[in-house]
Amino acid sequence: PFCDPRHPRVLLVLSTRPCSMSVCPSEGFLHHRALPNMARTLLLLLAAVSSAATNATKPHVMLIVGDDVGNYNLGYHGNTEVKTPEIDALATGGARFERMYAYFWCSPSRASIMSGRFPAHIYQTQQPMGHTDDGLPRQMTTLAEKMRGTGYRTVQAGKWHLGQGSTGHMPINRGFDSSLGFLSGAENHVNQSMCSATLCFEAAGGVKPLRILAGHPLFDLWHDHDVGTIGETDTGTFGDDRWTDHVIGAINETSSTSKPLFAYLTLAAAHSPLQAPDTALAPYPESMYRDRRLYSGLISSMDANIGRLVAALKGKDMWSNTLLWFVSDNGGPIYWSHLAGVPSMGAPLNTGGGANNHPLSGGKITCLEGGFRVPSFAAGGGR
């Protein structure tokens, strides 16, 4: 069921050749050049906005990446079950990219966004993220570096997932002036404890090394160069609220005479573990299938944070000169978290899927279109 270059395409039945390192489906199923849509669209948009003559005329750019947000899991795509009024309004009033394709899991898509290249060209197709030399190659120029070079102030918040083995991999050293987030993935949405007791973070070069010891979970929170102060007892803030607050802080610091703002907000919703704030779960009855209800709550939480971001831009009179671009990193996960109380794929009971990719087949980690066709739109208050 996984698209591994070493295995035949058993799911598609259209070919017995091994998967391409860059695109799994056969050319008859999806054009073999479809994958760069994400990177190419982004680069074209940003080339247009960054070419303005002066900082005063350059628009602010908000690049928002959702995590595991399936193509059909937003209201503007006809899903009446999920509640996403903020996203629906932005997409309906903006430009919708209805044939947007990403990679079929997280890190390679993010590497394409930051580099503008195929995942296979940047060694991100089968790489584990916890090793010293893995992640987006440090010698590559990133999108953030390009934006900063054209006069932008650059801010990152949320999930990084592009390397964590050395200080050189961290966002603050990849073109961002400010960073608050976590380097890995699939972490507790409240206290940032890592869900896997097998992953060990070994930092090099001056960053404090953290290890998972027996009975001591790893907490993954970083502010610029430093380990964050959040601990296991901090249950007051939902993770995506924290990342959104960091970008809103940068918005509030922006003035008419300061540099234009480029914000890379990578929300953890709707990635497992399936944890959603009570306010986000309120619209969904407890009679819903458990995973679908929790996943939908995460989607609504993401929607609320995007709404808060837009409200902050409007409050600072910046929305009329802002380009907001939203995209998901892969299709929605549809694996089950539990069958008769038995964990799926060795994961805890709250790490399931819950997405609805109808009418597409498959989901995240599969070679079917539900795994890599993603929602995307651009919006703004002016042009």
Image: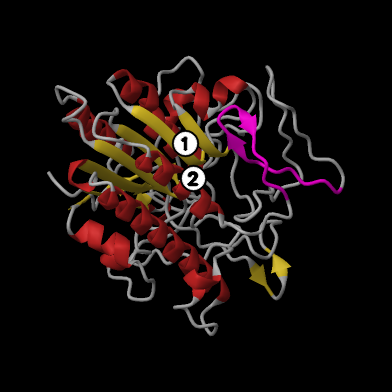
* Residue 203: percent from left, percent from top: 69, 25
* Residue 338: percent from left, percent from top: 65, 69
Q: State the residue in front, 30 or 240.
A: 240
Q: Secondary structure at mark 1?
A: helix
Q: Marks 1 and 2: in contact by CB < 8 Å?
A: yes
Task: Please state if 337 lies on the left or on the right of 72 as rendered.
Answer: right
Q: State the residue in front, 134 or 259.
A: 259
Say whether residue 87 is visible: yes
Q: Quadrant of residue 299?
A: bottom left
Q: Amino acid at mark 1?
A: Pro
Q: Quadrant of residue 44?
A: top left
**Badge 1 local density, few (<14 within 10 Å), some, or many (20+)?**
many
Count of marks, rendered view: 2
Say whether residue 19 is visible: no
* Residue 314: percent from left, percent from top: 26, 51
Q: Amino acid at mark 2?
A: Trp
| 227 in magenta | yes
Residue furthest to the right in view is 214
Q: State the residue in front, 129 or 321.
A: 321
